[in-house]
Amino acid sequence: GQNIDQPTEMTATEGAIVQINCTYQTSGFNGLFWYQQHAGEAPTFLSYNVLDGLEEKGRFSSFLSRSKGYSYLLLKELQMKDSASYLCAVLDSNYQLIWGAGTKLIIKP
Amino acid sequence: IAGITQAPTSQILAAGRRMTLRCTQDMRHNAMYWYRQDLGLGLRLIHYSNTAGTTGKGEVPDGYSVSRANTDDFPLTLASAVPSQTSVYFCASSDSRALTGELFFGEGSRLTVL
């Protein structure tokens, strides 16, 4: 079956750096997405990786290794507003998005 | 403001009742989707539509139906609601089914079936 694994919850300190990992086993691969979802709100797009390597976008970076079935989202200079759930999703060979359960990130002052 | 609008935002429903969740987008996106989100689980696809006039079944279609009469609207109907359909429902859209970019989500509809 298809599976996306990410930690259920992480805690970090304001101003610090945190890395949220995502591993996947899917039927084919057509890209990996990261979304942010604040409590009670809709998910919003953060990043898309289809090739190996690091994509940087401001304080957020996303890394992909297709051979390892692995990605991470790196958040730098953490702010309180970064407290949210971070969803990893993989586009499989049928162009269906397979979603992880999400990682709840708690930022402490 | 361009985007996706869902209605209602929240609804409590008696089991056995029929319910339609509405979804409208004004971005002229071809593809639209309905997901449900339950605690501890990832978003699960209920139904999708690649373009107006076509629909397809997702991962968890049972008990749900959709229609796509035009580009903008994609309603989701629960013919006879059951308590296991208590969930938060998200409508989403994208430029194409072959996702290479952003999926836009509505604000969600929180449904409680008693």
Image (cartoon, rainbow, N blue to C red):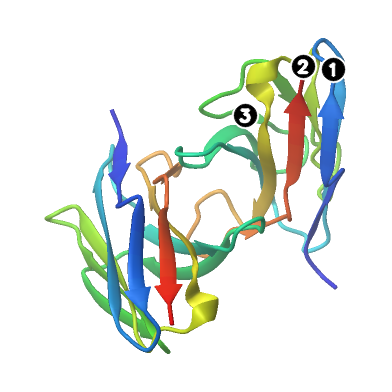
In this rendering, would A108 be left or right of B84? left
- Name the amino acid type tagged 2: Ala
Q: Secondary structure at mark 1?
A: loop
Where residue B106 sits: x, y (%)? 73, 55
Q: In the depicted view, which residue is nearer to us: A53 or A72?
A: A72
Pointer 3 local density, CA inside 10 Å: few below 14, some 14–19, many at least 20: some
Which residue is found at the position 58% from the left and 63% from the top? A38
Question: Is B49 rendered above or below residue B56?
Answer: below
Callouts 1 and 2 close, C-beta under 8 Å: yes
Residue position marked by numbered label 1 in the rendering: B14
Where residue A81 sits: x, y (%)? 55, 78
Structural distance between the alpha carbons of marks 2 and 3: 21 Å
- Name the amino acid type tagged 1: Ala
| Badge number at residue B41 | none
Residue position marked by numbered label 3 in the rendering: B56
Name the image quarter holding the N terminus of chain B: bottom right
- Name the amino acid type tagged 3: Gly
Q: Earlier in the sequence, mark 2 or mark 3?
A: 3
Residue position marked by numbered label 2 in the rendering: B81
Where residue A97 sits: x, y (%)? 45, 45
Task: Work out whether residue B22 can be spotted.
Answer: no
Q: In the depicted view, which residue is nearer to us: A11 or A101?
A: A11
Which residue is found at the position 49% from the left and 70% from the top? A83
